[in-house]
Image (cartoon, rainbow, N blue to C red):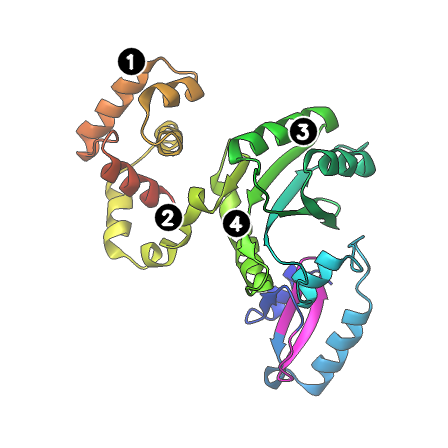
Amino acid sequence: MEPKDLRTIYPDAERHNYPAIDPAYLSIPTDSGYLWLLKKKLSEKEQLLLTLLSKEVPSSGKSTNSLWYQILFRQKRIEKEGHFRVIQIQLQLPDDFLIDAWKEHINGIFSHAEDSLFLTPQSALLIEKQAEYTLTKEELEGIFLTLDDDFGTLSSVFIGGFHDSTSVFPALFEEEQTIFREESHLMNRQRVFDISDVALHYFTKDALAKSSLILSMKEEWVIDEEMKEIIYILWRNQGNISSTAKELFMHRNTLQYRLEKFQENTSLQLKNTDDLILCFLLLNS
């Protein structure tokens, strides 16, 4: 049974990276962690059946014996001192994908990599220790674009933050997993991103969803698909008109005209940072 099927049957199930220590919960292993089910909401037969099913979950090729798998998913303590980050990678693969060659390339590029492992055939993690020099987001984007060209893949990459080895590392990684899962669809053309790219939306979306004012604005301002793309890319380019026009393959004067028409309809000037932020949040509420 797939995790999504269990979530349909048990919508209150919680997803975590590690099994429950609290005996009040039943933990069901999945390809991306564990589903926690409150035992008091289950009959004895349900508990027995789910326990039996969990023992039959097939291996998906996870490196379960890997030290970093144990750290991230089994709460094993990090023995080394320092700061570490987890780079999460989702891959669309060709039929002839060479996983060993891909891993060899990755390990060769990242000289400070502690480990690389696949959770599923399409989902990988790269764990890196912070050094005097670490690759920037722009450099990582170039690397993964090159890898995609070489291996025929399509990558979506989330760069986690560097966290102290003495901190609650698995809990921080779990939240970064949630951010990657929930926010990657907003990135469109941007294949490599980090928390700074999505923080505004991720940490405000619950409030936006409850706002009657935001709902009213969405109904009053009809924003077509072309304008939505302009807003997204203008946001990503921090309001820079020239960079946005170049990325859209649009003449600068044409873009300027679109922005002026939008201002006439909404009274919002997208060259103004506050107005641009409002529109970006509006589209993602």
Give how far apart the Cα atoms at labels 3 and 1 are: 34 Å
Q: Which residue is mark 4?
A: 161
Which numbered disc, 3 or 4, marks the residue that appears first in the sequence?
Answer: 3
**Front of the two marks 3 and 4:** 4
Q: Is residue 225 left or right of residue 121?
A: left
The residue carrying mark 3 is: 148
Badge 2: few (under 14), some or many (20 or more) residues near its Cα, within 10 Å? few
In the rendered view of the protein, which quadrant contains the N terminus? bottom right
Instruction: Please give the range of residues in magenta.
Output: 20-36
Q: Are marks 3 and 1 in contact (CB under 8 Å)?
A: no
- The amino acid type of the residue labelled 4 equals Gly
Q: In the rendered image of this protein, does residue 102 appear above or below residue 1? A: above
- In primary-sequence order, the first of circles 1 and 4 is 4
| Upstream in sequence: badge 2 or badge 1 | 2
The residue to which callout 2 is attached is 200
Instruction: Give the x, y percent position of residue 173.
Output: 57, 57
Residue 253's label in the rendered image is: 1
**First in sequence: mark 3 or mark 2?**
3
Mark 2 or 4 closer to N-term? 4
For label 1, count other residues whose C-alpha is less than 10 Å away and answer few (under 14), some (14-19) or many (20+): few
Crowd tier of the residue under label 4, counting other residues whose Cα lies within 10 Å: few below 14, some 14–19, many 20 or above: some
Amino acid type, residue under disc 3 in the picture:
Asp
Tell me which residue sits at (44%, 21%) in the image.
Answer: 247
